[in-house]
Amino acid sequence: MTLFLENARLIDPETLRETSGNVVIDNGIIAAIGPMAAPGGAEVIDCAGKCLAPGIIDIGVKIGEPGERHRESFRTAGLAAAAGGVTTVIARPDTSPAIDTPETLEFVTRRAAEAPVRIRHMAALTKGRAGREMTEIGFLMDAGAVAFTDADHVATDTKVLSRAFTYAKSLGALVVGHPQEPGLSHGAAATSGKFASLRGIPGVSPMAERIGLERDLALVEMTGVRYHADQITTARALPALARAKAAGLDVTAGVSIHHLTLNEFDVGDYRTFFKLTPPLRSEDDRLAVVAALAEGVIDIICSMHTPADEESKRLPYEEAAAGAVALETLLPAAMRLYHAGQLSLPQLFRALSLNPAKRLGLAQGRIAEGAPADLVLFDPDAPFVLDRFALQSKSKNTPFDGARMQGKVLATFVGGVQVYSNDK
């Protein structure tokens, strides 16, 4: 089947350029780009001057299978991803049980086949994510694991972690770390400071992130492993990250869209939908992280999609579950940075699509001839008020409920097949 997308505003994260043109898709591959006529027999879609960009590759999505299917299933996560312009989901292993054996990985891989988007899985770095014994990294890679992480269970035994890093290095595996010092961050629900003190919320110093990152980077220097920090959210952690990159270590870093667009004051009067891991930071930290993203010190924007049911959120702030859904809000929230003049659209899609694909060795993430036709068509200026009950996710725990936003996904294509269309 041949598809012809005409009159599009092409967002190219490789060249950091925007151009007008047409795209020919043949058998799931981008066959041609430029000012050409539609091939005979092609299905024509008029993009009406709206933006066409590589589909988003979202690293670190929590899906509730196995164990918490009532919070999110592969089907609902896939529908939410398609509605949000996410064409490849990289799922976390913090399930129940954890994805720490080839058998569990094969099970979730089969279950993920029902989703309309591509879903790949990370596996646990240690058994049960307990930090005591490393998993069979080689067998898990053979079963399809794209990276290894214990998510927010930070290992306290540095010797175990160093052995896991050494083994991962020997196999060329990517390790994804969660930079937090576990002792300092235990039991914290906010970033320490005046706001947390006035609200009586137990806080954690921003230094906990720097300490955790410094430890991980020292182990990276010792072992040479490929390493990705899932979230860098504080200004104090940025110099260490920049030094590691300047020293030639194989290190990248991400940041969640919530830490790029919200700050600690958004918590207000104990609004638990704003309780995240790590907690929201100061406005100075937020601006420093945005600047680091623009400069390329931070490489990737992710949703850190973490569904939670009403029962686990409608609790006192300290006791409420942390996390927020974000597959559908990732793109419109990112448009806040574009409309504020902080990042261009090509810069945004470098962090949303190109850099995640490069880090994971995927062919997607580009809008170029020969690349897979995983694309998102969107209007960056379309205004709307977010209604959380209209989200495709099973769980509705979004901090953007009732927020005025700009940027609507109009269509999503995976392998040249349209998997979402906004007819509204």
Image: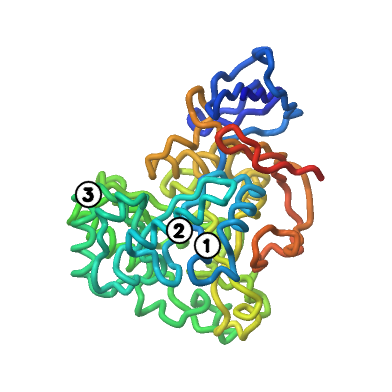
| Label 3 vs 1, first from the N-terminus | 1
Q: Residue at x 52, y 71 (%)?
A: 279
Please provide percent x and percent y for residue 99.
Answer: 39, 64
In the rendered image, the vertical position of residue 344 relative to residue 405, given as above or below? above
- The amino acid type of the residue labelled 3 equals Leu
Which tag is nearer the camera, tag 3 or tag 2? Answer: 2
**Which residue does the numbered mark 3 point to in the structure image?**
171
**Which residue does the numbered mark 1 point to in the structure image?**
63
In the rendered image, the vertical position of residue 51 relative to residue 190, given as above or below? above
User: Can residue 165 be seen here?
Assistant: yes
| Badge 1 vs badge 2, beta-carbon distance below 8 Å | yes
Q: Residue at x 49, y 28 (%)?
A: 371
Badge number at residue 108: 2
| Label 1 vs 2, first from the N-terminus | 1
Badge number at residue 83: none
User: Can residue 288 be seen here?
Assistant: no
Q: Nearer the viewer, residue 96 or 266?
A: 96
Q: Is residue 133 left or right of residue 341?
A: left
Q: How far apart are the alpha carbons under marks 3 and 2?
A: 23 Å
Please provide percent x and percent y for residue 107.
Answer: 43, 59
Provide the secondary structure element on which disc 1 rests: loop
The residue carrying pointer 3 sits among few (fewer than 14), some (14 to 19) or many (20 or more) residues within 10 Å by Cα, namely few
Q: How far apart are the alpha carbons under marks 1 and 2?
A: 10 Å
Q: Residue at x 59, y 52 (%)?
A: 78
The residue carrying pointer 1 sits among few (fewer than 14), some (14 to 19) or many (20 or more) residues within 10 Å by Cα, namely many
Q: How far apart are the alpha carbons under marks 3 and 1?
A: 27 Å
- The amino acid type of the residue labelled 2 equals Val
Please provide percent x and percent y for residue 134.
Answer: 25, 66
